[in-house]
Image: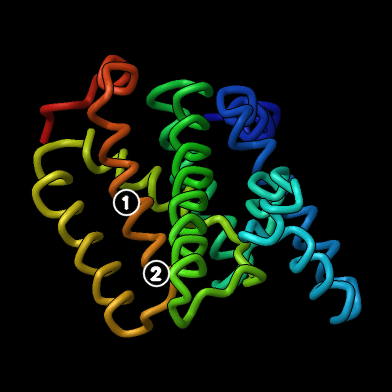
Amino acid sequence: METRAQVWNRPWAAARRLPATTVYVVLLAVTAAWLAAQPLRVQERFIRHNSSNVHHFEVGKWWTLLTSGLVVDGVPVLLGIGAVAAALGRAEWRWGSARGLGVFLFGHVAATLLTQGGVWLMRLAHLPGALPRMQDVGISYGLVATVACLLALGGDRARRYGLPALTAALAIAWTINQELADAGHLVALGLGVLASRTRWFREGSPERGTR
């Protein structure tokens, strides 16, 4: 039977094993708690100034590529933080901190750049719908890329059923909503699968080929 000390030590042992996930989850929770305590105008200003959009890139605010990932947007805060903890924690547990956090950041940054690059091209072509000052924050691009990479490097069932199911769900969301973020989710999914095919991730995937 476990002693009280052993029960208390389990969360700390997990935190030591998953330092990147722990730090990121704490940052998300602290940011969410701070935002919840602010007036609506302060919340809106914070999100506006930390959105990774074309306008901010043009004026040199490239740091928004990182700060935009500190805001949980579009889903309930606890659900979003829990999803990050599960997906990033699983990736870090399997592949280590560098690979786990690497695929999350790759998905978040690359999907943001590609989607905002699309907005920039639309503006150059004078196409309707180009919004250079649009709000673009959230955890979803990195989350989708991480889950896609986990599924692609999972067992046969994960690759055969899980990955197509995720693709179908994201494609349906894009078809219904026709929003840039939904297109970005599909881009992030492709980036996660692409990352799974690199030697860096395949070498860190002992479960590949299992059922």
Identify which amino acid the numbered label 2 is placed on.
Asp
x, y percentage for residue 133? 67, 70
Going by the numbered disc 1, the residue's amino acid type is Leu
**Which residue in the protein does label 2 denote?**
182
Residue furthest to the front:
125
Q: Position of residue 109 (x, y in %)?
A: 53, 44
Asked whether the beta carbons under mark 1 and mark 2 sit within 8 Å of each other, the answer is no
Identify the residue shown where x is 27% and y is 80%.
Answer: 175
Residue at (34, 43) in percent of width and height: 191
Label 2 CA crowd tier, 10 Å (few <14, some 14–19, many 20+): many
Task: Tell me how far mark 1 sits from mark 2, CA to CA.
Answer: 11 Å
In this rendering, the answer to whether 171 lies above or below 91 is below
> Measuring 51% from the left and 74% from the top, which residue is drawn there?
130
Q: Earlier in the sequence, mark 1 or mark 2?
A: 2
Residue 85 or 130: which is nearer the viewer?
130
Residue 189, numbered label:
1
In the structure shown, which secondary structural element does the residue marked by tag 2 occupy? helix
